[in-house]
Image (cartoon, helix red, strand yellow):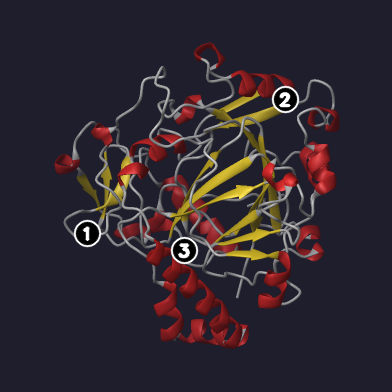
Amino acid sequence: LKTISGRNTQPIMCQGYRSVLPRKMNLRSLFLCGLIFSMTPEPVMSTSRRGDAHSKNNNDMGGNGNEVIIGDCFSPDDTTNNDSLGEFTCEDSLTLSTSQEKWNWEPTSSSHPCNILRLSQSELLRAFGPLGVPNLYPHPLVIRPDNYDSQNEATINNNYIGRNRHFANMTTLEHLPLNFPPNFNVTLTGSDSLSTHRRIINLSQYLSEMLDANKDIDRPGETLPDEFGNETWYLFGETFTKEWAEFLQHYNLPTCQSCTPLHRQQSMIALSFGIGNIGSGVQWHLHGPGFSETIHGRKHWVLYPPQSIPVYKMEYASRHWMENVYPNLEDWNDQDVKMELKHDEEFLKMWKRVSAKQRHFDGMMGNENESIDEIEEQGPSNKKPWECTINAGEMIYFPDGWHHATINLERYTVFVSSFTTEHN
């Protein structure tokens, strides 16, 4: 109750449970989400294959009754839905030996694809006006600084060139501990889909462990695909103490209609600070809308829209999915990318033509704008997800209810996520 009263606002994540998440998040639905989530039993652990999967009747929780728990995997029922993303089952996990030199998906690669619409800060303002991204915008966006140039030396070296240069200087590996009292403790979470475990540790100790992870097998500062999420400690999501609040006051918020100084003053936006090493990240989950900006390093995002439920193993970190499932999915071809970007651009133009007042009225009356819906639901099915690498100084907008997972790509990756409270 303290969380939803407007004080000490924290993001409530209905992680791994699409069926209980309302389509549009507000304070009431956040509470409902948290209430239902707390009542939802843990997935049954099993080694059964797809044929032995047991149905889960979730009609009482607002679901469609067609979702299945496959061991500890969460996926659509194959008998009623043919849009399952991949043929991965719980028992089909193929992990690589830690001595193997080349992975199926190499996080440090500089050539990961991006099929999400990218806008510069100026293009964003021209598209949406001075307040920036509108409330409950339904498509992901990547926002980059105006001075971003892929051929620029600073960009090539992945140096920060965005709006938060002072904050970037504060958060270098050398300067970060100086922002906190000596022997400052942080709370780490597991990297599994539900972030079920907690560990309290000194900040300096965490940085040392993170940078030296797997050093003994010549993979220093790297989280491997076969490591369990509840054994992969991660600084993210537990940064809401007084010390963190004072520290995050130095961070400039994204440009959005729910990111104003008033929203910040009234605790209607929650900031979360994170640090990870190569291959670390949180397994597939979903929650309300927001932004995530990379301050140091690079961070790769993969997303599916609400109607497309990815199949994954909840107890592993996200790199496990990238290693074992992602390579087996069909690639987007050039035409797919062009069509999706075209649809995004058309939707952007149409969004501007249909006033926010009219969209609100249509929503209250149960009306649907067919032309908008047609564009919104475009995109290849049974293929790899929407994805993009977010470099230092760039940020991603993730829409309400979109499934997503993240993978850090550098030994010292720093990021800030802004969880917004949005209404039409």
**Is 123 rendered above or below residue 193?**
below
**Is 138 rendered above or below residue 246?**
below
Of the image marks 2 and 1, the number of the one nearer the N terminus: 1
Residue 138 lies left or right of residue 239; in this view the side is: left
Residue visible at 38% across and 67% down? 335
Q: Amino acid at mark 2?
A: Leu
Please identify the quarter of the rendering in which residue 132 is found: bottom right
Label 3 environment density (alpha carbons within 10 Å; few <14, some 14–19, many ≥20) = some
Q: Which mark is residue 300?
A: none
Instruction: Say what secondary structure mark 3 lies in.
Output: loop
Residue toward you, 387 or 110:
110
Q: Which residue is mark 3?
A: 22
- The answer for how far apart the CA atoms under marks 2 and 3 are is 36 Å
Label 2 environment density (alpha carbons within 10 Å; few <14, some 14–19, many ≥20) = many
**In the rendered view of the protein, which quadrant contains the C terminus?**
bottom right
Residue visible at 83% across and 31% down? 175
- The answer for how far apart the CA atoms under marks 1 and 3 are is 24 Å
Task: Tell me, yes or no, if residue 195 can be seen here.
Answer: yes
**Is 66 rendered above or below residue 353?**
above
Q: Are marks 2 and 1 in contact (CB under 8 Å)?
A: no
Q: Which residue is mark 2?
A: 203
Residue toward you, 65 or 400:
400
Residue toward you, 131 or 13:
131
- The answer for how far apart the CA atoms under marks 2 and 1 are is 46 Å
Residue 218 lies left or right of residue 67; in this view the side is: right
Q: Nearer the viewer, mark 2 or mark 3?
A: 2
Q: Which residue is mark 1?
A: 82
Q: Amino acid at mark 3?
A: Pro
